[in-house]
Image: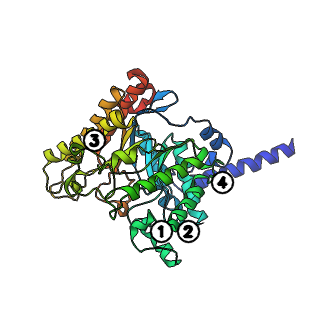
Amino acid sequence: MAGNGLILYHILGLASCIALVYFSLGEVDLRLSLPALPFSGGGASSRAASLPFVERRGARLFLDGRPFYINGWNSYWLMDLAVEPDTRPRVPSMFRTAVSMGLTVCRTWAFNDGSYNALQLSPGHFDERVFKALDRVVAEASQHGVRLILSLANNLDAYGGKRQYVRWAWEEGVGITASNDSFFFDPAIRDYFKVYLKTLVTRKNHLTGLEYRDDPTILAWELMNEPRCTSDPSGDTLQRWMEEMAAYVKSIDKKHLLTVGTEGFYGPTSSQDKLNINPGEWFPNNYGADFIRNSKIPDIDFASVHVYPDNWLQHASLDEKLKFMTQWITSHVEDGDKELDKPVLVTEFGLSHQVEGFDDAHRDVLYRAVYDIVYDSARRGGAGGGALVWQLAAEGMEQYHDGFSIVPVERPSMMRLIKEQSCRLAAVRYGEEGARKVLKTVCS
């Protein structure tokens, strides 16, 4: 009895110390640490492995036997912020905010080549610290019920881009030209990229124990963000690269969907009516892209479209931007229905607050137009597979703002619009009553 009493005394003493420390700290949000708990065991692995993969059936995406229409968002910065402990909490914070609006898919960068916090330090050499950050992003997405579209390279210079691959080849004395477009045709650079692709796709997540290619949390791979090859307007160079890399990814991973990452510009194989839809300076110059031809590649599962009316139609009125945006997206959805028999996703759309005459209400009008086209297509079982706004950010992330960033809590009308779209698409998938059950706090 005395021994048991002594043990109890020590336990009570320890509990008192813990309580004293806790209350001395004031209010502490313990939720930030909760997502890490399942990662240390096998729970996260078994949970992710038991999820169904998103699949394509003709012009529609399916998940667990039901049509799956996407209301999603872009947060390109997730891996970057997951590296450092002080910025890491913004990753689960962003997922929580997105889920509170019913968002289901996030598109983000799975590349950072040769720059600060680089994933790939040099060809075939990777920073394990940054790879573990990407592991965290995938694991956090799984914990929050979010699927990911992971982009694998950048046409632009940000986070290294194709320019960095060309620089590496030039520095090693194997590059055949200093042109950035040599990324698409230089054999050495294509080999660099294949090494990266294989390393990433077969990466074993240190938190879940799953290789990326076996993780249903990843909805799709995207070969490149906005690929362009201006040196070959015929489109042949870019087409050959797309075909080669798509086949290579599928040889490693047959479970996940694959898309190119194009903006949607029509090219030489398209009719004049389609070419006339290309905006502004893109009307005479497609920058080597050819939407129909690119999207017909057998290994490509769905087509992607971007739309930025204020960048593409400078000095246009709101009505002109609205007319163009509606025509642009509608045309590509029709391509999915009639020409491609593949889903078409608007993987980026946005309106910058930096343009002259910007008004938050203009954003609401244009974004609703995008959502309405997707919803109308979903209701009739069409190819409009979803839309992902560019971009959402957490609070205190001003350095990542690019004019398009939206912090949802600061824009109540946008939050309402996003929630409405989530509920409409959920109703297509589950029915009105089912949507209210699945998204209780969103659609109530």
Q: Could you tell which of marks 3 and 1 lies nearer the N-terminus? A: 1
Q: Is residue 120 left or right of residue 425?
A: right
Residue tagged 2: 123
Q: What SS does tag 2 mark?
A: loop
Image marks 1 and 2: residues in contact by CB distance under 8 Å: yes
Can you say whether 178 is above or below 147 in the image? below
Looking at the rendering, in which quadrant would you find the N terminus? top right
Q: Which residue is mark 4?
A: 17
Picture coordinates of residue 257 (x, y %)? 50, 42
Residue 84 appears in the figure: no
Judge the density around disc 2: few (<14), some (14-19), many (≥20) Cα neighbours within 10 Å. Answer: some
Q: Are marks 4 and 2 in contact (CB under 8 Å)?
A: no
Q: Residue at x 53, y 48 (%)?
A: 140
- Of the two numbered discs 4 and 2 on the same chain, state the one appearing first in sequence: 4
Q: Nearer the viewer, mark 3 or mark 4?
A: 3
Earlier in the chain: of badge 1 and badge 4, it is 4
Residue type, numbered disc 3: Ile
Q: Nearer the viewer, mark 4 or mark 2?
A: 2
- For the residues labelled 1 and 2, the Cα–Cα distance comes to 8 Å
Kindly identify which residue carries mark 3.
329
Mark 1 = which residue? 165
Mark nearer the N terminus (2 vs 3): 2
Label 3, label 4: how many angstroms apart (C-alpha)?
61 Å
Q: Which numbered disc flags the more N-terminal residue, 3 or 4?
A: 4
